[in-house]
Amino acid sequence: TADGAKMGKTESGAVWLDAERTSPYDFYQFWVNVDDRDVGRFLRLFTFLDVEQIAAMEALEGAELNRAKEALAFEATVITHGKAEADRAREAARALFGGGGQVDAVDMPTHEIAADRLAEGVPVVVVAAEGKLCGSRNEARRLARQGGLYVNGDAVDEDRAITGADLREGGALLRAGKKRYLRVVSR
């Protein structure tokens, strides 16, 4: 990458082509979040777009560069997972980050919790770890202490529990930081 980091399976945050290891949504998000300096080179390496289209996208600056990142993410996801999955991933990203679309209808990482567990209340740090929103309960605790763990848009502390009352329109939306989401549903 432009900052000198290698892109490989041993790197933290590596993406996999297998949908079982990296969901199409997470795959799409990886490409949207690449360093601005890498966009043009990655468009050439990982898509089949015309060189003229890529050159036009490279000329974009600031917020406009996000259009090039979306094109990179969409095209790379189409090649890897097919157009239907790429469309779903793009719709999910727009619903979550662009204010368009309905979050409850979005194909995003989802974690199912038994209704009886929800009735008792499940600690948010447990849900974040079980649903792979955070790598561990300790990571979720640290994130909550720093004000970076959210339930339905509200920052929560580490002692907060998820209950059935948190499920709105069939699910609760957990967020870690600014860009990682998990929908929690009852089964």
Image: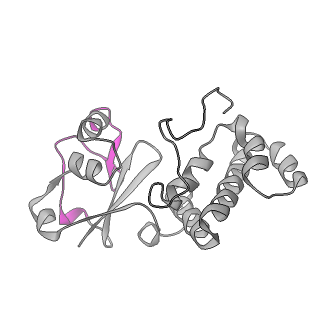
Residue 77 appears at what percent x and percent y?
62, 60
Q: Give the range drawn in magenta.
A: 144-166
Q: Where is residue 148 in the image (x, y as percent from the top left)?
A: 36, 39
- Up the image or down, 83 lies above or below 29; here it is below
The quarter of the displayed image where residue 41 is located:
top right
> Colour scheme used in the picture?
one colour
| 71 left or right of 121 in image | right
Q: Quadrant of the N terminus?
A: top right
Q: Is residue 16 above or below residue 108?
A: above
Q: Nearer the viewer, residue 143 or 34?
A: 34
Which residue does the image show at 34% across and 44% down from the upper left? 134
Left or right for 80, reference 24: right
Q: Is residue 94 left or right of residue 160?
A: right
Rendered location of residue 38, percent (x, y): 71, 38
Q: What residue is at 56 percent from the left and 66 percent from the top?
A: 91
Q: Is residue 43 magenta?
A: no
- How many numbered callouts? 0
Residue 72 location, x and y as percent? 70, 53
Residue 153 lies in the magenta-colored region: yes
- Extreme residue toward the left, this view: 120
**Farthest right residue?**
52
Q: Residue at 24%, 53% (x, y): give it.
A: 127
Q: Is residue 46 left or right of residue 162?
A: right
**Which residue is found at the position 47% from the left and 47% from the top?**
179
| Closer to us: 1 or 115 | 1
Report the residue that reaches farthest toward the top: 4
Q: In which quarter of the image is the C terminus?
A: bottom left
User: In the rendered image of this protein, does residue 22 appear above or below residue 86?
Assistant: above
Q: Which of 40 and 46 is in front in this view?
A: 46
